[in-house]
Image (cartoon, grey):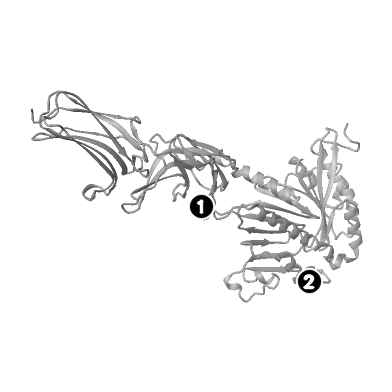
Amino acid sequence: MSLFPKCSFHYYLDKGARLVPGQRNAGRLVLDVPEAITRAEHLVLVLKSQAWAGYGSGKNRRVVRNELLRLPLRVDIPHGGMPVGKHEYPFHFDLPDWLPPAFDGYDCGIVHELEATLDVDWAIDPVSRVNPRVAMLPTHGRRLPSVVRSPNGFHEAIVLEITLDSAVIAEDEPLSGKIALRAGADARMDAVVLTFCRITTVAMGHGDRRKSEVGVVRLTPAMLHSGEPIPFLFPPDENGVPSFGGPQLVVDHVLRVSVDVPWSFDPEMEVPFTILPKGSSIEGEGSAVAVGGERLRQMAGYLAQRTGLQEGTPPVLVRGKQGPVTFQLSDAPRGGGLGVEAVIAYPAMGLDIRMRPLGMLDGFRSATLVPPELRDKFLLQCEIAERRYSRPPLVEADFHRVLHGLAFADSIRMTDHHLAFHVALPDDPERLVKAAEFIAEKAKTIAALYPSLPFPAALEGSRAAWEAAALERDGFLVPTVPQIVGMKMLVRTLGGEERTFWVRIGTEWAIVPHGYVEVTCPEAPMPAQAGEMLAGRMPHPLLAPLHSTFTMSQEGHSAIRLHTKDLVHDPRVLFPAVDALVSFMLDVRGERRVNAAYR
């Protein structure tokens, strides 16, 4: 017999080419001996499992190894050794149910090895090694959709919403879901990158987390700017590694979401999910959860139904009106966190109202116009031309009623014609309903201020005429200016189209106080030569009677402003001029008005 005995090994497992933890795994080892091995003494079969992790490189390179399992089997060879031919040896291993599958991660992994050695006296022992596949036992799970939003501080402007159809999937199933840009469409970014990652936590070393990328999806800003959800799908992991944990290595799976920001730190977040072993039974069905614009539309519909307000177009959730006061509640994430912004618009009162955050040098200023809960945050000033009115138009109690209950707002802005405030608020439907109801009540409070406002002393005797004019044209009177707003004229043209003209009659308290009329039709812009006609440099028959009494100018492309020479004591005397301006705006466009309904 030679120093190098010849022998080939063949392995046959009853469960195919795999081992199943938690069960008895039987098989056969067949040795093919072409030449008699007379000094063969023993046959040793060992199943070994080992976890390993590498650290460093070069001279500092080291590898930490930890043996998970070692099951040896020994068979004594009869006296006389092993003759020529095939020799079959049955074997079995009772594997523990915690045995993890083999995998190759980022400089770490788990290796299972079946080693057979023929112990030959005074010779080199024939050795054979194979790596059987260890398949984890199927288990039970339940499909659950997962909705994740980028956390506060993720990015100063960008808010992302991600949903997984199910956060629990089987090893041979794809990962699917949707992503939407909730806020930050104008933010600077090159792409949003989705990465299917396998995370290995090396518990036997330093506890570091090592990422292995399974798949990558890159979404351009153009795909996300609309705010609509973008579906994505990752095929199953080709390596077939389910999620598992152990004292040496822990394998988890996450969907890493990062924003590729040029010349800056790329913010990222992780959405965890679980992969169960192949063959696992998963109850339920994964469901698609609305995100982005789709979610905003659902919230807008719910708020409109609960509050009776008008449903808005995202980012506006709901809008409403209380007399002359309009208001809206909008989705307004800020600083990477969710929030809403309320904007209440009302006719200008003709008062100089300014509100701003309280500064370091404002300690000696009086902040009594704001309620006590806001005095350490905001300064409100209202400078009223005292000589213009016989009494103050607004007093401290009026401002307190308007601003009461706004201590929860992180910013407040108030002027002569609008009140706006921002509140950090999650997507809690009931809290959003309360916010919408609060804003509607606040608009009602502001609308209730107008009837008690005084007229300027110079026009106090004309109040009845102004009230009659507002009633006649279905407008709203603001006494402090005074002005009439919201007057609407519907005109049918010979072409069958209906034009809407908005009319405002008011007062300007300039060096020479005087009245004015403003007529606007946004849907019917005027040509460039209209300004020349209004200034009197080009004649027009409809404007000739007005030039001797008024001065006129074009405001933008769709508005005309007419100025009187003195204060207006009865706005009704200006109604013929309004009709003339409407006719001119149609005529200069080549349109004609009709009095009869279009047929």
Point out the frontmost of discs 1 and 2. Answer: 1
Q: Residue at x 64, y 54 (%)?
A: 340
Residue 202 placed where, x, y %? 34, 49
Type of residue at label 1?
Answer: His
Residue 362 placed where, x, y %? 61, 73
On screen, 113 above or below 207?
A: above
Residue 593 placed where, x, y %? 86, 38
For this orientation, the residue located farthest to the bottom is 364
Residue 349: tell me if it is visible: no
Q: Which residue is mark 2?
A: 386
Occupied quadrant, residue 125? top left
Q: Helix, strand or loop at disc 1?
A: loop
Q: Helix, strand or loop at disc 2?
A: helix
For this orientation, the residue located farthest to the front is 79
Q: Are marks 1 and 2 in contact (CB under 8 Å)?
A: no
Question: Badge 2 local density, few (<14 within 10 Å), some, or many (20+)?
Answer: few
Q: Is residue 283 left or right of residue 493?
A: left
Type of residue at label 2?
Answer: Glu
Q: CA distance from mark 1 to mark 2?
A: 48 Å
Please state, as top left, top right, bottom left or bottom right, where the N terminus lies in the image: top left
Residue 143 placed where, x, y %? 53, 41
Between 24 and 316, the residue placed more toward the observer is 24
Give residue 155's mark: 1
Q: Is residue 125 left or right of residue 548?
A: left
Between 32 and 559, the residue placed more toward the observer is 32
Q: Residue at x 27, y 30 (%)?
A: 28
Q: Is residue 222 left or right of residue 116?
A: right
Question: Badge 1 local density, few (<14 within 10 Å), some, or many (20+)?
Answer: many
On screen, 54 above or below 591?
A: below
Please state, as top left, top right, bottom left or bottom right, where the C terminus lies in the image: top right
Q: Residue at x 31, y 51 (%)?
A: 204
Occupied quadrant, residue 378? bottom right
